[in-house]
Amino acid sequence: MRAWQVGRLGEPAEVMELADVNGPVVQPGHVVVDVAAAALNFPDVLMARGEYQVRPPLPFVPGVEVCGRVVEVGEGVSGVAVGDRVVGTSAPPAGGLAERALMPAAAVFPAPKALDDAEAAALTIGYQTAYVGLVRRAGLRPGETLLVHAASGGVGSAAVQVGKALGARVIAVVGGAEKVAVATGLGADVVLDRTAVDLVSALRDAAGRGGVDVVFDPVGGAAYEASTRVIAFEGRVVVVGFAGGTIPAPALNHALIKNYSILGLHWNLYLQRERAVVEEAHRQLTAWADEGRIAPLVSQRLPFEQAVEGLTRLAQGRTTGRVVVLAPA
């Protein structure tokens, strides 16, 4: 089969090659799928660099998030059958940037019928992270104010849509005029361009005297610090990642004085330790997709041969929403 392989560690453009390789062999507790589409994620870039917590043996095929149709079912797998159209995450080193991918059965979910292959490929990681973060961790309630950083990105755009579906007022923070238009289109009530305003002052004006009830932060650094300046009494800060490159060192005395909570979210742990949480998330997300209340923002649908270009743009922070690589023709 055709697959993009990482043969040595480095930037995707330098270390990825298109090759003919053997297809993945089904294993107990896994399924093999014909890949229809693979959504690109920053972990794909980090794995190529050797900077991710999961370090598959070389050579490996990246592509952690896929939509495909099941062609083989491993021993011990129930609830999934050959022919099922599914979404979920792959099992390194047999990732989704290939004609076929291996997927752990625990990370496989029915693909929503309302979404096409590219949209469905982009549903699992971003939207389940947003849902579990906002519902399970933060307990976001209708009428509360939600602040989303990096709101035009993959997980941020999901958080905007999930927040609106939950009945929140959403303040979106982005970087650049083009991304303002994207976040506005997603339904955010207020959109702030951090490159054009004093962020803390603008957030105070947008939030009002009551402040922000919930913060969804995949950025860290200055974004986190600004959030703590406008957090409400009994507010909740959901820490999702550190795309800004700086891991904050929270002042716990400040959390004590202002009476707010700092909540970490590692979505993949729920797959490992409490799958019922992600099953419920997927059921609700599917229902919202059927109702037209959420739809993954796919900014680019790339042919298979352009996967490296997509990962390069992602690594450089030049994408909005999700970039999806379509199956080989």
Image: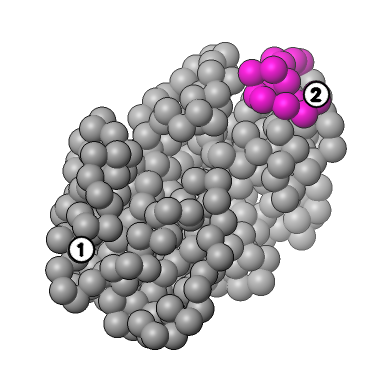
Determine if the magenta segment contains residue 8. Answer: yes
Q: Residue at x 39, y 25 (%)?
A: 300
Q: Is residue 84 visible?
A: no
Q: Residue furthest right?
A: 57
Q: Is the residue marked by circle 2 packed among few (<14), some (14-19), or many (20+) residues within 10 Å? A: some
Instruction: Tell me the residue at 29%/44% (across/down).
Output: 194
Colour basis: one colour
Where on the picture, by quarter, is residue 209? bottom left
Q: Position of residue 246 (x, y in %)?
A: 55, 51
Q: Residue 266: where, in percent of width, then height?
A: 58, 63
Mark number displayed over residue 204: 1
Residue 327: % across, % down: 54, 24
Q: Is residue 327 left or right of residue 118?
A: right
Question: Residue at label 2?
Answer: 7
Q: Quadrant of residue 202?
A: bottom left
User: Given the image, on which type of amino acid does mark 2 rest?
Assistant: Gly
Residue drawn at x 29%, y 34% is: 176
Camera-near label (1 vs 2) is 1
Helix, strand or loop for disc 2: loop
Q: What is the span of residues highlighted in magenta in the rendered image?
A: 6-20
**Position of 24 compared to 178: left or right?**
right
Relative depth, front residue between 175 and 102? 175
